[in-house]
């Protein structure tokens, strides 16, 4: 009976995924074949995007591998600072990063210089792409290097192998991680939307993702042309995703059950100083300088009343509701997997992996095609926007909650049931207390990602409910940097307030009963 109920729940979940993922994508991707025409052009946008993506990956992949190697093998404050910098770059919205640098170069004096001319062109796009691609390459390479064996390095040290041969051996062992980082950097750069929507528009550089948006935003809407461009974007992701999987298998071929991970140790002073300088460079370029520019411009008086005053609280609400829905879907899928509904959960796993490979822009475009009709008139509603957020963030929520739920021993619940504890007590005092911290971390990360999300928001937000990311990008395109800076800082402050509130609540709930206030 229990397995049957789990199978029923899995079937319902599979039906929802088919309705809100498979069906919309099929509707979008078959449009060029049904209509027989479409904008077969936009090849310059595709070529420029591919060249920028490959160029970004050429720079970001080796740097990411070096950061990954340093943060997995080194100990000390520099290694911790490098890890924090990578996470800071990963979490910083790309359009906020771009806004900060556009504020710096918006003055006529700086814009007329060689650096200003290079920034408002391919050079600026490449710089920002590298900053945003670095954490993806580093974190992916770090996951590969975390399972590396320390035996080659120990053998080289014991036998006194000279420095140059040791470097060659290290590069050969590091090659799979670099290749995976290269592929991921290409995919993430091709799918980037925030930088093209801000600096790309100002620089008049054709970018593929913004070309898709233009086909959907123009009147009449060119769905077939947008579909063709989506096919190109998905094709690039498929090619480089296959390359990443092949490189992962090659890296796994040298792993075995008797490996020992390299022990962390304090690096040599020259090496530590070099990485400290590199970490400071990326922290300044990707976090400190843009945020400082936002603060300075936000202090300047506005020429008119504050536009989009409700965007911050509205997006915060979207983030909280969307995070709740995403984590609910993730927990349900993990529960179904644990209950033994294997066939259905296998289907769900495949759908979630495919969902991770589909950019949010393509998913939102498919929603416009699929739900803008009399049968399912969801387009233009907040419900569809929340569904789009949930569909895009559910894989992230699942990955973040998977480890915590897998570590939850089912014997705990069985023992509580044997001792006659009520179901509510089991959920709150046993499972809730064990899962509250990882759930809070996952909730905050997903809520922040939804609050500052751009492509899905840009295409699906209903009239009169402008999300924060759309408001900031719109103000950037109007060169109203003071208002966009204030909105960005208000958004960061609101998310920081939510994090502090949840942290205080978790500390209060998870504290021992004798320490709780009466």
Image (cartoon, rainbow, N blue to C red):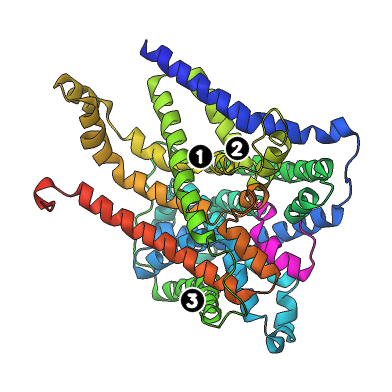
Between the C-alphas of marks 1 and 2, the distance is 9 Å
Which residue is depicted at the point 55% across and 42% down?
Answer: 386
For residue 516, the mark is none
| Kind of element beneath mark 1 | helix
Q: In the drawing, does residue 467 fall left or right of residue 259? A: right
Q: Indicate which label's residue lies in the foreground, 3 or 1.
A: 1
Question: Magenta stretch containing residue 361, yes or no?
Answer: no
Between the C-alphas of marks 2 and 3, the distance is 38 Å
Which residue is depicted at the point 54% across and 68% down?
Answer: 487
Q: Earlier in the sequence, mark 3 or mark 1?
A: 3
Question: Magenta stretch containing residue 191, yes or no?
Answer: yes
Q: Position of residue 59 (x, y in %)?
A: 64, 64
For residue 277, the mark is 3
Task: Tell whether label 2 touches label 1 (CB within 8 Å).
Answer: yes
The residue indicated by pointer 1 is: 394
**Magenta region:** 189-207
Please identify the quarter of the rendering in which residue 130 is found. bottom right
Q: Indicate which label's residue lies in the foreground, 2 or 3.
A: 2
Q: Residues within 10 Å of mark 2 (few under 14, many from 20)?
A: many
Q: In the drawing, does residue 378 fall left or right of residue 262? A: right
Q: Earlier in the sequence, mark 2 or mark 3?
A: 3
Residue projecting furthest to the top? 1
Q: Residues within 10 Å of mark 1 (few under 14, many from 20)?
A: many
- Does 383 appear above or below 475? above
How many labels sit on residues? 3
């Amino acid at each position: 009976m229990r397995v049957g109920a789990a199978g029923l729940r899995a079937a319902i979940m599979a039906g929802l995924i088919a309705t809100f993922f498979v069906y919309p994508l099929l509707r979008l991707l078959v449009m060029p074949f049904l209509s027989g025409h479409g904008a077969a052009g936009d090849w310059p946008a595709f070529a420029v995007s591919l060249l920028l993506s490959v160029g970004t990956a050429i720079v970001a992949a080796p740097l990411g591998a070096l950061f990954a190697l340093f943060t997995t093998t080194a100990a000390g404050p520099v290694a911790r600072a490098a890890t924090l910098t990578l996470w800071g770059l990963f979490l910083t919205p790309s359009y906020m990063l771009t806004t900060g640098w556009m504020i710096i170069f918006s003055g006529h004096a700086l814009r007329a210089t060689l650096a200003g001319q290079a920034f408002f062109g391919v050079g600026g796009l490449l710089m920002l792409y590298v900053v945003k691609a670095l954490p993806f390459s580093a974190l992916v390479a770090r996951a590969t290097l975390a399972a590396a064996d320390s035996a080659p390095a120990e053998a080289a040290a014991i036998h006194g192998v000279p420095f140059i041969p040791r470097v060659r051996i290290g590069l050969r062992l590091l090659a799979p991680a670099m290749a995976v980082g290269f592929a991921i950097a290409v995919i993430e750069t091709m799918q980037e939307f925030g930088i093209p929507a801000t600096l790309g528009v100002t620089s008049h550089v054709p970018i593929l993702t913004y070309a898709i948006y233009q086909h959907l935003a123009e009147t009449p809407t060119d769905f077939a042309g947008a579909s063709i461009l989506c096919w190109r974007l998905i094709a690039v992701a498929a090619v480089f995703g296959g390359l990443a999987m092949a490189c992962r298998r090659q890296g796994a071929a040298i792993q075995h059950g008797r490996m020992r991970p390299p022990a962390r140790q304090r690096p040599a002073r020259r090496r530590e100083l070099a990485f400290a300088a590199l970490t400071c460079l990326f922290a300044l370029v990707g976090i400190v300088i843009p945020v400082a520019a936002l603060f300075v411009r936000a202090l300047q008086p506005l020429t008119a009343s504050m536009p989009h005053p409700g965007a911050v609280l509205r997006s915060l609400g979207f983030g909280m509701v969307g995070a709740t829905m995403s984590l609910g879907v993730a927990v349900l899928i993990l529960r179904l997997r644990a209950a033994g509904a294997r066939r259905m959960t296998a289907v769900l796993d495949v759908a979630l992996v495919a969902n991770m490979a589909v950019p949010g822009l393509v998913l939102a475009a498919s929603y416009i095609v699929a739900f803008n009709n009399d049968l399912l008139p969801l387009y233009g509603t907040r419900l569809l926007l929340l569904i789009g957020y949930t569909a895009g963030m559910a894989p992230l929520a699942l990955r973040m909650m998977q480890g915590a739920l897998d570590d939850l021993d089912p014997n705990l619940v069985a023992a509580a049931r044997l001792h006659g504890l009520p179901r509510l007590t089991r959920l709150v005092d046993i499972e809730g207390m064990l899962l509250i911290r990882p759930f809070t971390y996952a909730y905050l990360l997903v809520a922040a990602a939804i609050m500052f999300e751009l492509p899905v928001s840009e295409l699906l937000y209903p009239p009169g409910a402008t999300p924060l990311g759309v408001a900031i990008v719109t103000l950037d395109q109007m060169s109203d940097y003071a208002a966009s800076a204030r909105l960005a800082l208000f958004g960061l402050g609101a998310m920081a307030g939510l994090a502090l509130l949840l942290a205080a609540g978790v500390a209060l709930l998870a504290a021992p009963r004798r320490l709780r206030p009466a």
